[in-house]
Image (cartoon, grey):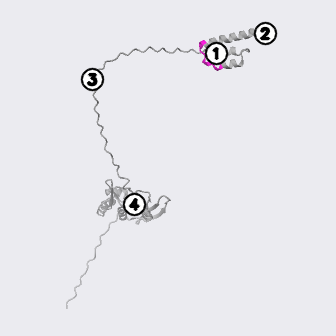
Amino acid sequence: MSEATKTTKEPVRKTKVESYDISRSDETLHLATDLAKFIKENKLTTTVQGKEFVNVEGWQYAGSRLGIVPIVDHVINVSNDQELKYQAKVTLFDMRSGHTVGAGFAICSSKEQGKKFYQEFAIMSMAQTRAIGKAYRNILAWIIRAAGYEPTPAEEMEYGGNMPATTQPAMTVVPTAAAPTPAAEVAAPMKAVAAEPAVEAPAVVTYASAAQKEEIIRLLNHPVITRQEKTKMLLNINRLDDERATQAIAKLKKAIDDRENGQSAAA
């Protein structure tokens, strides 16, 4: 009688998943190498203007290798009549220490480029996705940079709005050849121009002096000078030149003499 041969199964060896400590720089540099490989193999990047930005799944992988998980604190509806708009807050929880180690805020709006016809749940979901990426970016940006990628989550990039503007080629200005000058114009004889008569400089006006004005005012205050005559002379006293001031003084003196002599004769 043959004994039953017992076959012993070898225990299945499970691959040990390493966990890194964010407080140790040597471990996080090893994480950067592992992260670069994981992102490349799973195509977790979006290319914008020739630069590679890591999708939120890549940020979550980096966080999970450090024992840091995201927790959505709240999602607030801040919509109005013109747009759908949600704001989300996410905190990062360190499972080793049991403490919150980071946070991130983000919004999403239907007024953004390409999101005009998004349904409400999609706007709300994108706000949460952006907040997760933002929270991880606040503490792990340098690790993503060390892995060879841009330190901004891909969900924050506006792909259409960030395209470089198309530049128009500069116009080349071709100098225009000067038209040939006719020989007649080049060798045209100079015509003699009659000299214009010299313009005499205007004579300098010498206005009445202060002494002349004082004399005129003294004479105007004489009782025989009427109020109308006095007002008319005073209105024009600053316009009198030296000659007219002399004439005005002579006329006033004569008028005073004539009126005084006339009053004496009448008496």
| Amino acid tagged 4 | Gly
| Amino acid tagged 2 | Ala
User: Which residue matches tag 4?
Assistant: 133
Residue 153 location in percent, x, y? 37, 58
C-alpha gap between disc 1 and disc 3: 70 Å
Q: Earlier in the sequence, mark 4 or mark 2?
A: 4
Q: Main secondary structure of the magenta part?
A: helix
Left/right of residue 85 with respect to residue 147 in the rendered view: right
C-alpha gap between disc 3 and disc 4: 80 Å
For label 2, the SS is helix
Residue 227 location in percent, x, y? 71, 19
| Residue 213: numbered disc | 1
Residue 254 location in percent, x, y? 69, 9
* Boundaries of the magenta span: 233-243
| Residue 266: numbered disc | 2
Q: Nearer the viewer, mark 1 or mark 4?
A: 1
For label 1, the SS is helix
For label 4, the SS is helix
Q: Nearer the viewer, residue 203 or 133?
A: 203
For label 3, the SS is helix
In the picture as drawn, the residue positioned furthest to the left comes out as: 1
Q: Does residue 187 lie above or below 142 as drawn?
A: above
Q: Quadrant of residue 197?
A: top left
Q: Earlier in the sequence, mark 1 or mark 4?
A: 4
User: Which residue matches tag 3?
Assistant: 183
Left/right of residue 7 with respect to residue 104 in the rendered view: left
Q: Nearer the viewer, residue 18 or 202?
A: 202
Q: Nearer the viewer, residue 82 or 181?
A: 181
Q: Earlier in the sequence, mark 3 or mark 4?
A: 4
